[in-house]
Amino acid sequence: MMNNSNAGSLIAMLIADLVWVSSASAQALPKQGNIEATYTAAGADVRNISVSGDDAVYLFETTLLMASNNNSPLMRNVTARCVEAGFSAGTATGYCVYSDKDGDKFIEAFTYQGGSTTGKGTLGSGTGKYKGIEGHFDWQQVLALPSDKGTYNYIGKKTGSYRIP
């Protein structure tokens, strides 16, 4: 288990990476490419409705901060707000709205089996430079970070590909 000092150092490195990226010069977004992104997720339960025992129907909200990867400009300088709903013993589904500094957006739809730390997602519904975007990716939780009850924090990774017409 990671202690708070190590977790804090890791978060500080990710934030420093984000600051460096935002100070880098703008680069045109390729019309197709790979998705290779590391991110920090921080979220909280919005509502849990107990069904029986430990099973519950739930809704929670998450913010994703993307770290830089020079091989994946799509996920550079964007943040995402996400909502997820599911049954703790079944499949969970959710949506994220990514936005960049210009206000352009695209949507991620994702699914995974309750209790799993991996899943799949698709990209679509873009505006501005992302209009017509399509993509597929796998995601995984790489490292769980300390968090209070009803909240969660983790570092994750997304890998896949995208295309913009």
Image (cartoon, rainbow, N blue to C red):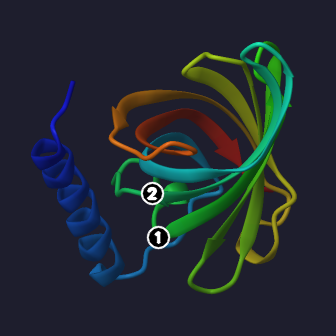
Q: Nearer the viewer, residue 119 or 92?
A: 92
Q: The N terminus lies in which quarter of the figure?
A: top left
Report how many numbered discs are placed on residues in the image.
2
Q: Amino acid at mark 2?
A: Met
Question: Residue 30: x, y in percent?
Answer: 57, 59
User: Does 130 appear above or below 43?
Assistant: below
Q: Quadrant of residue 153?
A: top left
Judging by the rendered image, the residue that carries numbered circle 1 is 77
Q: Amino acid at mark 1?
A: Asn
Q: Residue at x 29, y 79 (%)?
A: 24
User: Does 1 appear above or below 11?
Assistant: above
Question: Residue 126: x, y in percent?
Answer: 81, 64
Q: Is residue 59 left or right of residue 63?
A: right
Q: Are marks 1 and 2 in contact (CB under 8 Å)?
A: yes
Label 2 CA crowd tier, 10 Å (few <14, some 14–19, many 20+): many
Q: Is residue 120 left or right of residue 142?
A: right
Judging by the rendered image, the residue that carries numbered circle 2 is 66
